[in-house]
Each structure stands twice: as C-alpha cells, then as structure tokens.
Amino acid sequence: MHDTPAGSVALQRHFASDNYAGVHPEILEAIAAANSGHVPGYGDDPITAAAEDAFRRLIGDDARVFFAFNGTGANVVALAAALRPYQAVICPQTAHLNNDECGAFERFAGGKLIAVPTRDGKLTPADVRRNVRELGNVHHVQLGAISISQSTEVGTVYSVEELTALGAVAREYDLLFHLDGARLANAAVALDVDLHALLVETGVDVCTFGGTKNGLLFGEAIVFPKPHPAIEALPFTRKQGMQLASKMRFVAAQFEALLRDDLWRRSARHANAMARRLADRLRSVDGVRIAYAVEANGVFAAIDPKLVAPLQNERRFYVWDEDASIVRWMAAFDTSEADVDAFAAAVARIASSSAASSAAQNGARTEPR
C-alpha cells in the first residue's frame, strides 16, 4: 500500500495492465501549459506542428504523423486508409487487432483478418507465404496487408532482423506492412535501437506509436515512416473513423512532452526493468513458471490454477490462457521496486500456503485408520 492523504482511499498498484497507471507528471504539466489562449482546432496549431517535428527528428524527414484518440481507432484508421473492403490482413492469432478490438477492423474497414497461430506471438515470413493464395481470383478475398504488434501481446520483441524479413516478404507480395506499436517504446528500449532503424530500415509502411500505455492521459499516433499512397486518404479516414480531435493541441502537447528529453525511453526502460525484476523474483517460486521470454514490460507465467483466485483477491491481473493457466502481469512507468517486491512476496506466500494445504490434505488421505 502507498501513503495517501487523510480521508482518501488507499490505492494499490496492480499488475493487470499498464493502462491502470496514472499520467506521468511531465505529461500533466504539458497539458496544463497548452491550456492557454485560443489556437485553431483540428491540428492546425503550433503545438501539433511541434509534436510532428519531434517525430520527424526521431524517425526521418519524410515521416508523416496523424494523432488519434486511442489504439483501436489508430490501428483501424491506418489500415482502412490503405486497404479496400475486399482485402485481408494476415496477423498473429494473439493480435490485439484480432482479439481485443471487438471486430472494429471488420466492421469499419469491411475487410477480413486471417489469424495465424504462433509459438511466441510472432508472425514469420513462412506464415505469410503459407497464407498467400488465390491471388486474382474474384471469388476469394485478396491479401492486402500483414499486421504485427511490437512488442507482441505475450511480451516478446521482434528483432530488427525479424522485422526486416517481414518487410521483405511484404514487398514481395505487395502487401502493406502495418505495426501495432501500443508498446513500441518498450520494444525500442529492449532492442536499444532508434526509431529510424526500427521502422524505416526494416520496411514498416505504417505504425501506431502508443502513448496511453507509456504515461499519457490519452492519445496515440499514426505514423508513416516514409511516403505511402495511403497518406492522402488518411485525413479523411481519420475523420470518418471519429479519431480527429477538435482540440488537437491537448493530444499533441502530450506527445511533444513524451518525445522531449527521451521521456518515452526513460518511462519504457523503467517499466521493462520492473518486469524483469518481477520475473527474477518469481523464478524460484514453486507453482510458478515463466511462460514466455520477458523482453518488454510483461511477465506471462504459468501458475497452479489454485493460486489464481487467492492472488486476484489481493491484486488485479488477467488470466491470459485459462486452459494453460497462464496469467499476465504488466509493469508500468510508475511501478516501483517496492511494488514488485510486495507482489512477488504475495505470490510466494500464497503459493507456499497452497502447497502446505495440499500436503496436509494428502497426508490426511494417506493416514491409516
């Protein structure tokens, strides 16, 4: 528990999602600073221009940036601007686009998702090639794009080489290469590479750059790292998709602050470090097995099913795979070492209590009459 003012409710830090975190103080300061005077709406203001320039300094002079409200909207608008309704997107089965966006792509863009099972959340060139079929056949949906998440939904990170290979296969079949970057900052820090190397040099056509999971109040960015025909359609698709903010300066000001002085990297680096700390403290706990490599800010663990309910009574988190009893624990920019250690201690305590209870029950069953 954390100290709180008298009369207020004490708030625990949970590990359910980095969305649970509050807003970074530097972001709040930027919002307050933008709240002065009148400026034109819908992005025609100096604050939005400054944020766009900040992205170009990181990615390259050719980058184009369009701000949106949320990740689902940013993903769908980006794809809808580039594709026709008869086209399909190949993505991992675990993709947020496939599982957690309530069919938004299918409804709004009218296209089809081809979800591919993966071992570690990563799409491969072989996965793409296996799903290239019936090109030019009027009776079949036509492939239009591949979509991946970086970092993935299971906390793994595509290497630069893996991204480059996907970029090559996308060009081979004339497919849009879309990257859901809700946690792109965490991946960039994990790989220790800059955004130009991560996006331009690998062949990404369009990505989202997450802000909400890295300390923003709200807001995501749709980024075209280099010129692309969909850029012409994007402003209209964004408006149709209800992602055009009238008071755009308050979205843009957050991103300008996030990119200033590497706040985006500092926050992501801390979240990643807290996830590694949690994994390290859990590796020796009986009944807990780390299920995927801890490469970003998520820990996915296979745990004894009997531990789930007692743990969830103390801290909120999600069961990722009920059949395999794999749970997801996420760290955020404001997760402290004390938060991690307290949660790890709770896991160890509950696991030990469960093991002792099971041993006692087994002993009672085997005791002679």
Image: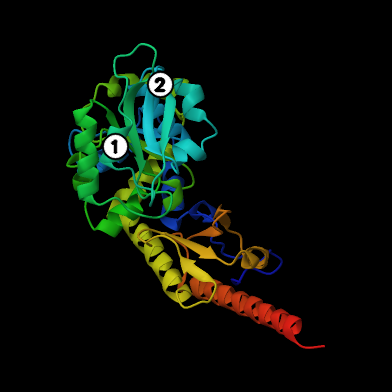
Residue at far right of view = 369
**Of 156 and 120, the residue lying toward us:** 120
- Residue 361 position within the rendered picture, expressed as x and y whole percent measured from the top left: 72, 79
Instruction: State the SS at label 2.
Output: helix
Location of residue 226 by image quarter: top left
* Residue 360 point in image, percent of width and height: 71, 83
What's the amino acid at mark 1? Glu
Question: Which SS class for mark 1?
Answer: helix
Marks 1/2: CA–CA distance: 19 Å
Q: Quadrant of the N terminus?
A: bottom right
Q: Residue at x 27, y 33 (%)?
A: 129
Q: In the figure, 150 relative to 63: above or below? A: below
Q: What number of labels is visible?
A: 2
The reply to whether dot 1 and dot 2 touch (C-beta < 8 Å) is: no
Q: Nearer the viewer, mark 1 or mark 2?
A: 2
Closest to the observer, 74 or 148: 148
Indicate which disc, 1 or 2, sits on the residue closer to the N terminus. Answer: 1
User: Residue 36 placed where, x, y %?
Assistant: 44, 40
Crowding around mark 1 (Cα neighbors within 10 Å: few <14, some 14 to 19, many 20+) is: many
Residue at 53%, 76% (x, y): give it.
286
Residue denoted by label 1: 52
Rendered image: mark on residue 237: 2
Q: Residue at x 67, y 67 (%)?
A: 310
Residue shown at the point (48%, 23%) measured from the top left? 108
Kindly give the residue lying farthest to the bottom in the view shown: 368
Q: Amino acid at mark 2?
A: Thr
Q: 338 above or below 270?
A: below
Q: Which mark is residue 289?
A: none
Q: Is residue 317 visible?
A: yes
Q: Is residue 184 left or right of residue 248?
A: left
